[in-house]
Amino acid sequence: MESEYQILSHLQDNEITTQRKISKRTGLSLGAVNILLKKMVRKGLIKVEKLNTRTVRYILTPKGMKEKTRLTYNFVRSSYQQILNINAAVEELVAEHLSEGSAEQVVLYGPDDEVEQILKNTLRGLNIKPVIKRPEEDNFKPEPDQLTLTWRYEDEENLTGYNRVFNILSLV
């Protein structure tokens, strides 16, 4: 569970903390943090030590460290599988688009982020240098011979009505 991972990570770095600080750092509600901490204490993942009437220390137990490692491993594994799925979807789209004989360009339309880097690397492996377009460029309109890849739903909506525009994340 991602929420448990976030709390365990926070506690590993900050033994002396408050539920409010955990809530603020993780984006979880204060009530959710309280429930999850109690659950993790019952599971033996953390110990709570009172330092005084207002301050407690949360100690990650060996079982808690093991659980954090397990959650990290599952996250990395899932992320890697998602990258492989993106690569396969891009390769399939490019092969289909190129087989039609009309692919002049592949356009990446979206922010400069991790997904863009994955797409660039995949296209580089196919010997394709993409054209980069940003959503801030209001004047972008895909040409009929362009394969346009996006990865955010709001950007996909900006390009509704054009052929050969695909949200790569909706294909994986």
Image (tube, helix red, strand yellow):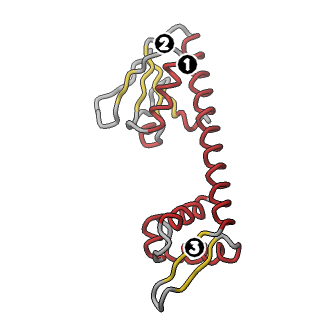
Residues under numbered marks 1 and 2 in contact, where contact means CB atoms less than 8 Å apart: yes
Q: Amino acid at mark 3?
A: Ile
Q: Is residue 95 above or below residue 13?
A: above
Give the CA separation, mark 2 to mark 3.
57 Å
Q: Is residue 172 left or right of residue 114?
A: right
Q: Is residue 125 above or below residue 45?
A: above
- Counting from the top left corner in percent of width and height, residue 10 is at 50, 65
Q: Earlier in the sequence, mark 1 or mark 3?
A: 3
Picture residue at 64% right of the left edge, 44% below the top: 78
- Counting from the top left corner in percent of width and height, residue 37 is at 59, 75
- Counting from the top left corner in percent of width and height, residue 143 is at 39, 19
Q: Earlier in the sequence, mark 2 or mark 3?
A: 3
Disc 3 residue crowd, few under 14, some 14–19, many 20+, Cα 10 Å: some
* Foreground tag (2 vs 3): 3
Picture residue at 67% right of the left edge, 60% below the top: 67
Screen quadrant of the N terminus: bottom right
Residue named by callout 1: 94
Q: Is residue 87 above or below residue 15?
A: above
Asked whether 49 or 143 is in front, the reply is 49
Disc 1 residue crowd, few under 14, some 14–19, many 20+, Cα 10 Å: some
Asked whether 157 or 18 is in front, the reply is 18
Residue named by callout 2: 103
Find numbered disc 1 in the image and state the secondary structure of the residue it sits on. Answer: helix
Picture residue at 63% right of the left edge, 33% below the top: 85
User: Residue 172 appears in which quarter of the rendering?
Assistant: top right
Residue named by callout 3: 59
Q: Amino acid at mark 1?
A: Val
User: Residue 49 appears in which quarter of the rendering?
Assistant: bottom right
Asked whether 41 or 160 is in front, the reply is 41
